[in-house]
Amino acid sequence: MKEHVCPIWVGYLLASPIRKLAQNPKKILGKYVKSGMKVIDIGCAMGFFSLPAARIVGVNGSVICIDLQEKMLKSLEKKAKKAKLADVIETRKCTSNSLQINDLTGQIDFALAFAVVHEVKNKEKLFTEIHNSLKKGGKMLIAEPKFHISKENFDESIKIAQNTGFRIIEHPAIKRSLSVLLGKVKC
Ligand SMILES: C[S@@+](CC[C@H](N)C(=O)[O-])C[C@H]1O[C@@H](n2cnc3c(N)ncnc32)[C@H](O)[C@@H]1O
């Protein structure tokens, strides 16, 4: 299958405040992310979810924002600085084959993968790396765009995640999305 990576211009659209009308990050994340938590935002782009997550975790927590594209991360860094969240947000450039997060093993409370799983070719590796990074009891929220990801395709991704050790907790209602909250049961 041909790889598709979100273009930079779409990154600007995704970061638009108008999107909050349908997908409010504070509401979506507020159920799972708490003050002091350590969070990873996979495929963070320009930080539509990373900045609100950083506000929730506060100075005693951290949000590690991971993306393939340097331009996305640079834009996010600027926004974090402007919002006085630079101390809470760390950006990391990964490769298409690895998130390169071995140093985070067993440290993460919550992982977000919003509108990114369909762009990753090696899903087994993606979920294995995320699973390893989570603490026991840690959670991962996956949301995929309903308008271009089929239910079958989404279910296939969940199966792969389950095979790497995740279990399904719930299917939260998120507008325009197919979504699942997964949990890490064993270390
Ligand atoms: C459609 S955008 C979603 C951005 C953001 N999560 C949101 O909902 O606003 C997908 C992002 O994932 C990034 N991406 C694609 N493949 C990736 C991979 N293998 N690892 C990490 N990030 C990736 C892209 O560069 C892009 O910024």
Image: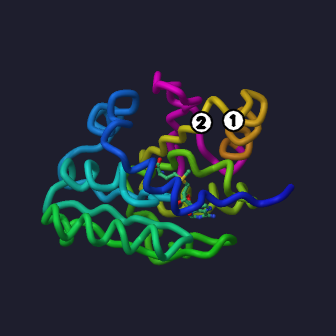
The residue to which callout 2 is attached is 145
Which SS class for mark 2? strand
The residue to which callout 1 is attached is 148
Q: Is residue 21 left or right of residue 102?
A: left
Q: Residues within 10 Å of mark 1 (few under 14, many from 20)?
A: few
Q: Where on the image, by quarter, is ligand 1?
A: bottom right
**Alpha carbon separation for disc pair 1 and 2:** 6 Å
Foreground: 19 or 104?
19
Q: Mark 1 near mark 2, Cβ–Cβ under 8 Å?
A: yes
- Name the residue at the front extreme: 9
Amino acid at the residue labelled 1: His
Residue at (46, 73) in percent of width and height: 71
* Label 2 CB less than 8 angstroms from ligand 1: yes
Residue at (53, 71) in percent of width and height: 69
Magenta range is 163-187
> Was residue 167 drawn as part of the magenta stretch in this picture?
yes
